[in-house]
Amino acid sequence: MKKFIDTLKNIFKIEDLRKRILYTLGLILVYRLGCYVVIPGIDPSQLAALKSQVSGGLLGLLDMFSGGAFGNAAIFGLGVMPYISASIVVQLMGMMVPYFQRLQREGESGRRKINQITRYLTILILCFQGPAYLTNLHVQLPAAAFLIKGVYFTIFATFVLMAGTMFVMWLGERITDKGLGNGISIIIMVGIIADLPSALATEWGSRVSQQAGGLIMLVVELVILFLIFVATIALVQGVRKIPVQYAKRIIGNKQYGGVRQYIPLKINAAGVMPIIFAQAFMFFPIIFAKFEATSSIAVALTNSTGFWYNLIFGLLVVGFTYAYTAITVNPTNMAEDMKKNGGFIPGVKPGKKTAEYIDSVMSRITLPGSIFLAFVAILPAFASLLDISNLFARFFGGTSLLILVGVILDTLQQIESHLLSRHYDGLMKTGRLKGRSGM
């Protein structure tokens, strides 16, 4: 405990780090206030029906990512999800379209162009998601909830939602530049954590009654949740190190190379994306509910706690993990870069053989990583079967757990780097924190 207190004192002794933390907290406060500012023209007292609708399913996921703004019909109702969608599209295009591949190789100038294209694509996505969100509001809310009627409200509210999302993006960029951590990731994490107090309160209320098992069951749940967090950290940080030897070169009176380094191949190189893609695919069976002959199949495939839903969901996560890893990790490019820099893997010929070796190692470590990722994805279903409230069960796995662990590790890694650069002890007594490669 004394070391923890000393570490906190050291953090606030560093002026730059202290300013970054306070700046980040200030912008987070602005974001949280915006999540409760209702779109002008909507009566806040009529939002009960909307809040009950976003309690589960895809809408519940969107509400969680927006920190409750989606269910509050707030100006930040769409959050950063349009920007995330645009980023995924641009990332996939960068792996398939030669123009984007050239931009990625141009360094800082190429990155600025990619960011500009991502922003334009975000606005285009908002032009579709904004009216769709407002249409849903008209379906869920009574007519008395709308103080402004007609198409004028739709146009006006769409611009408000677009401005809200762009402002949230600006907050994320400011946090990244002058604050601490990745701004967009921090905003998503804050939105997820915002539901934690109410989830704990709901679970506490259900467990204090004798019928629910008492406080002992609540303690057991918290211990299990802690163990799940530990296992998820191991999944996020797990790497397979491939040794690389660089040829010795003598230039003038100095020797370069001749040392052994390592290529860290992550066990979960795909991050949280396979779960997001799999969740999107699991909403397709809803289409079959419209037909009487296939309605029973649709019911079985949309029951989030059912056997067939979780089996197919887990298999989709495994498949998408392999597919996304194959897209993001290119063994051929890694082998070529290694060859250009005079590096080689001991016992493996440079070039094609090196690419085949990296690919085989990646395939072997992706299998256990994908299986464990699928297990993490279906853990909320097991939690619900154990009579844990749906709101609290979200934190036992899925996208929320992986995002929380990844963002916290990245932020702590930045804090530790500031401490070590000022000759203070790190956050851990032994070892060093390792962040993740991407969300």
Image: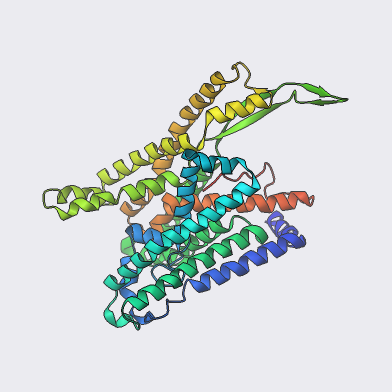
Residue 409 relative to residue 141: left or right: right
Q: Count the marks.
A: 0
Residue 366 placed where, x, y %? 46, 33
Residue 279 placed where, x, y %? 35, 49
- In the displayed structure, 137 sits above or below 337; it is below
Residue at horizontal 61%, vertical 15%?
347
Quarter of the N terminus within the rendering: bottom right
Residue 414 relative to residue 299: left or right: right
Residue 109 placed where, x, y %? 64, 49
Residue at horizontal 50%, vertical 42%?
94
Residue at horizontal 74%, vertical 52%?
419
For this orientation, the residue located farthest to the left is: 293
Residue 7 relative to residue 438: left or right: right
Q: Is residue 215 visible?
A: no
**Looking at the image, which is closer to me, 162 or 279?**
162
**Looking at the image, which is closer to me, 336 or 35?**
336
For this orientation, the residue located farthest to the front is: 99
**Looking at the image, which is closer to me, 416 or 33?**
33
Residue 278 placed where, x, y %? 36, 46
Residue at horizontal 43%, vertical 59%?
124
Q: Is residue 106 visible?
A: yes
Coloration of the structure image: rainbow
Query: For residue 105, which quarter of the picture?
Result: top right
